[in-house]
Amino acid sequence: MQLTGLHVYPVKSMYRLSPASAVVQPWGLAGDRRWMLADPTGRFVSQRENPAIGQIRTGLLPDGVLTLTAPDGSRIEVPAPAVSAGAPLTEVEVWGTRFHAAQAPEEAQRWIAEHLDDYRLVHLDDPRARPVDPEYGEPGDSVSMADGFPLLLTTDASLDRLNELIAAENPDGHEALPMERFRPSVVIDGSEPWAEDTWRRIRIGSVTFKVVKPCGRCVVTTTDQETGERRGKEPLRTLARHHRLLRKASFGQNLIPERPTGVEGDALGTLRLGDEVEVLEDGAHWPTDGR
C-alpha cells in the first residue's frame, strides 16, 4: 500500500491545500485547521451551516501568514495573531469542548463579514489547548480545530466500492463521487475495500499512528467542494444502508500520531506522497446497529 493523497485545511471547512509532503505534529499535519470561523456565541461554523465557506481558497506563506481568496478574486493576508503581543483571546467551542483562541485583526473580520457572514476568524494559539476525546485518546493527546482527531484516513478502494454501491442504488444514474467530498488528511491506495475499518496501528513512511475511531459522516459529503452546491442525498443514503459503524453512516478512520522514540519537539516526522503504508496491528471491530 502507498500514500496517494495529502490534504491540509488551514481554516476549518475552507478549501484544501494538497502538498506533496507534510510534517506530522502531535495535533495534526502542520498548518492544518489552526484557524476557524466562530459565530457570535463562539461556536464553530462550517459547511454544514454555510457551504459558501468551502469556496474560500486558502494559502500559507512561509512566514505563517494565512491568505484567503474569495470567488470574486478578493484576497487578504492575515498574520497569525500573537497572544504574547497582545492579541485578544476569546472562548470558542467545537463539538462541546470549549477552549481559548486568538482573534484575527479587525481588517480580517471585516473581510469575513463581507464575503460570508457575521463570523469571527480565530487562530489556535496553543495547539495543546484542546484535548482529544479521552474515550479514544490518552492523556496529553490534543487536536487542532478539526472535528475530533488529528488526522483522517480514507482509502481509494473503499471509495471505489462506495461508488459501486451508489450506482446500484441509483439505476437512473449518479455521478461518481470524488475523494474531496470526504475531506481526508491522508489517502491510501492498494488496500481491500473497507480494510481500514479493521486496522489498529499503521505506519506511513516513518510515522506510526493509532487508528482510533470510524468517521461518522454529515451533510458536507453531499456538497460539491468545487462549486459549493448541495448535490442530493448521496453518499449519506448509501452509507446509511451499507456502511454504518457506531450507529452512524461512516467512511474513513480517525488517526492519532505516535511520538517516535527519541524524537522531541513538535515535528514527529514527514509524510510524502508515495510513502509505503504498513499495517502494524489489526483486528479492530466497530459495532453496527444491524443495518
Image (cartoon, helix red, strand yellow):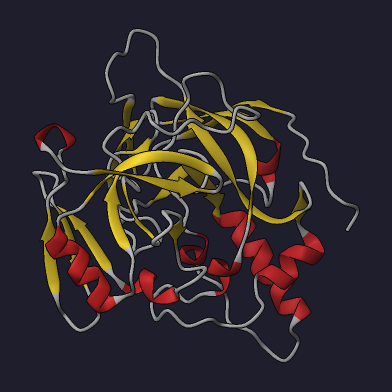
Asked where in the image residue 165 lies, by quadrant, the reply is bottom right
Q: Nearer the viewer, residue 168 or 75?
A: 75
Asked where in the image residue 235 lies, by quadrant, the reply is bottom right
Residue 107 relative to residue 193: left or right: left
Residue lying farthest bottom?
172
**Residue at x 74%, y 83% (from the top left corner):** 170
* Any part of residue 189 in sight: no
**Residue at x 46%, y 20% (from the top left corner):** 140
Above or below, comparing residue 267 to residue 193 in the picture:
above
Residue 80: % across, % down:
16, 46
**Residue at x 28%, y 43% (from the top left corner):** 21
Above or below, comparing residue 127 to residue 105 in the picture:
above
Residue 90: % across, % down:
31, 45
Residue 217: % across, % down:
62, 59
The quarter of the rendered structure image containing the C terminus is: bottom right
Q: Nearer the viewer, residue 62 or 22?
A: 62
Q: Nearer the viewer, residue 181 or 220?
A: 220
